[in-house]
Image (tube, rainbow, N blue to C red):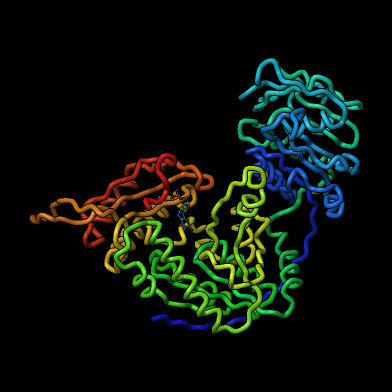
Amino acid sequence: MTVATELGSATNTPARVAQDTVFVLDFGSQYSQLIARRVREAKVYCELVPGSIPAAEIAARAPRGLIFSGGPASVYEPGAPHPDPDVYNLDLPILGICYGMQLLAGDLGGAVEPAQRREYGHASLTVDDEAGIFDRLPHELSVWMSHGDVITRPPPGFRPIAHSLNSPCAAIAGPRGRFGIQFHPEVAHTPLGRDVLRNFLLNVCGCAGTWEPASFIESAVADVRRRVGDARVLCALSGGVDSAVAATLVHRAVGDQLACVFVDNGLLRRGEGDRVVEIMSRQRHIRLVHVDAAEQFLDALQGVTDPEEKRRRIGRTFIRVFEEQARALGQVPFLAQGTLYPDVIESTSYDTQHAQKIKTHHNVGGLPENLRFELVEPLRYLFKDEAREVGIALGLPEDLVWRQPFPGPGLAIRIVGDVTRERLETLRAADWVVIDEIKRSGLYRKVWQSFAILTPISSVGVMGDYRTYANVVAVRIVESDDGMTADWAKVPYDVLGTISRRIVNEVPGVNRVVYDISSKPPSTIEWE
Ligand code: XMP
């Protein structure tokens, strides 16, 4: 049976802030997203756009400057990506990075040729002219290079301003604030790379460097108001930070026109469902329909052991329950989602366009297209840590804002084999100990994810004078930047020892705890 409860509401008012924008033109570098992050860290708002963006579109948005990313191609090859030639006629500063510098050189009449030797890794850069981007930086910089082409003649009006052993033109400067650098300032291996970027953004482009994620709140609120008018908006809360921040922002914009649906699938961690209701409804006064659908999900999962089948059934059940609630709310044209910038970049990136790579998204519950909502995605230009900052600025509590990533199918994919009410209780109790100890030891925000897995193994143990034959729980704690690759966390032995002792003592039916020391790849983070 599905139990739905609707709870009460009110509204708040925002503050006003302005912003400069820089565009990063993406020519296919694996670091394009990283460049965008670094620019934002310099407190300048930026967007990653396709390298082929029409000059008129850029002009219409009036950015302060452009950055050309690196890329895998050679500028002289047929089919290599180039910017719209009119981009060079816009009176805008440009910083070309690696392939981006070669584009600048090649397109403006210089010469680019294959290097005698590919330059890869650390290099020492000698600055010959402190103009603009090297302002107040040392004359010798340790930089990171990765290129097979070199500039043999800078374009007319440009001059070399730095060299390395293998690149006589390792950096160039030209008129109208145009610079090229052969090295990658965005990677951690170029220690002063951030200063080079800052110099370009602040000194050359004239950006104020005052942008903060929180300063985006007011314009996002205004955007939502403009888009939505006096129509109603629905938002599916997942229990995670993205949907909570998106809902809070939309609520700030349109107040009671927003109704949130929180489908509690019974597969959440201990206390997390109640905490969502407590924060969003009782503290924030957001209209919230809390659906206790645990039984429906458990029924759907009965006897299912295949991980993908679990996901499919959970997905289908979610849609059924959500549709039921949406229908009960009447005509709601808009759906708010907590989509973040990396998802947007992934689906519009150079890679996706050129290599036809199709990536699956894990957005809230994966709603079907025939629901015909218009999407409101107020966080679509924010990175995860920025969304967190916005959450804090909006007054959401730290425990929600800093919650570790949690998979949509929840604990069901952390119980290897059959998902039953009893096994869920066992896992939930063990998982709670892991989280409690990781928080106590100050590691919660330092690691990417920390959790327990209920394995299908029983092992022999001894408690007091009795022989036991009970469950084995695995503990998985990983470090990662984005979940794509991960390493097992080298958690101090005493913390692991306490976790193990507490689980065996506090969780009935468990007599052994093991620590997962596999990295991703070849393993995955989740066990299923
Ligand atoms: P894996 O196990 O693939 O996990 O290394 C990478 C990241 O994705 C999360 N994950 C999921 N998230 N639905 C989700 O919303 C899923 O089906 C799912 N599977 C894995 C996982 O927790 C980790 O952060």
Q: Quadrant of residue 316?
A: bottom left
Q: Residue at x 74, y 77 (%)?
A: 229
| Relative horizontal placement of residue 334, taking residue 474 as reference (left or right) | right
Residue 409 appears in the picture as rendered: yes
On the rendered image, what quadrant is the N terminus found in?
bottom left
Q: Is residue 494 above or below residue 118?
A: below
- Percent x, y of residue 269: 40, 64
| Relative horizontal placement of residue 188, taking residue 439 as reference (left or right) | right
Q: Residue at x 67, y 47 (%)?
A: 353
Q: Is residue 125 above or below residue 379?
A: above
| Relative horizontal placement of residue 500, taking residue 7 as reference (left or right) | left
- Percent x, y of residue 64: 83, 47
- Percent x, y of residue 61: 83, 54
Q: Quadrant of residue 305?
A: bottom left
Q: Nearer the viewer, residue 103 or 252?
A: 103
- Percent x, y of residue 203: 83, 39
Q: Nearer the viewer, residue 89 or 17?
A: 89
